[in-house]
Image (cartoon, rainbow, N blue to C red):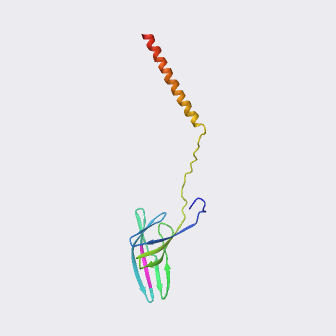
Amino acid sequence: PARNQPAQDVIEKDHTIHMGDTIWLSKTALVLDRINMYQTGDTIAAGAQFRELNGNESAVVEPQFLIYGSQTGTLPAELVYAGGTIVFQMIQPETDTFIFQTREQNVPQDWIIMKAIVFPMINLVWLGMIVLAIGFAISMRKRLEDLRRRKG
């Protein structure tokens, strides 16, 4: 969340995707593999088969979109690794897209806060270092000249 927003317990997000697309969540990724069609009596169901990926592990989750009579409904699926749910909200046949809503627990991020301290007189320290280096160079030159005079 933004700095001035309070932390939310649950994050809900809508996703409009095509077949084969991936939904990225905080702990996992969901890949839409295929749409399964089911029919019993006057109820038609479309199940979206997702592969839930978590590192080297994977699981299959299938939320369903139901049409019974002239009404629609959803049957959410629990996410195995992310600890949330995915809801099949709508099918858009004219664009071959599907709308899903994901709900997951807000995971607080681990942050390291560092404070930068600016020393107001740091320029004087650098000036002192330069004066010290110039003084050292002058004294070395004088000693070398004295050493040459003694030999010569």
Residue 69 drawn at (x, y percent): 48, 88
Instruction: Specify the principal SS of the magenta part.
Output: strand
In the image, residue 20 above or below residue 131: below
Taking the magenta stretch, the answer to whether it contains residue 36 is no
Quadrant location, the N terminus: bottom right
Quadrant location, the C terminus: top left
Closer-to-camera residue (135/101): 135
Taking the magenta stretch, the answer to whether it contains residue 47 is yes
Q: Residue at x 54, y 30 (%)?
A: 129
Res 34 → quadrant: bottom left
Residue 102 drawn at (x, y percent): 50, 70
How many marks do you count on the picture? Answer: 0
Closer-to-camera residue (9/93): 93
Closer-to-camera residue (150/74): 150
Viewed as shown, does residue 7 lie left or right of 99?
right
Residue 108 drawn at (x, y percent): 55, 60
Q: Which residues are magenta?
A: 44-49
Q: Residue at x 45, y 89 (%)?
A: 42
Q: Residue at x 57, y 45 (%)?
A: 116
In the image, residue 119 above or below residue 31: above
Residue 75 drawn at (x, y percent): 49, 78
Closer-to-camera residue (138/71): 138
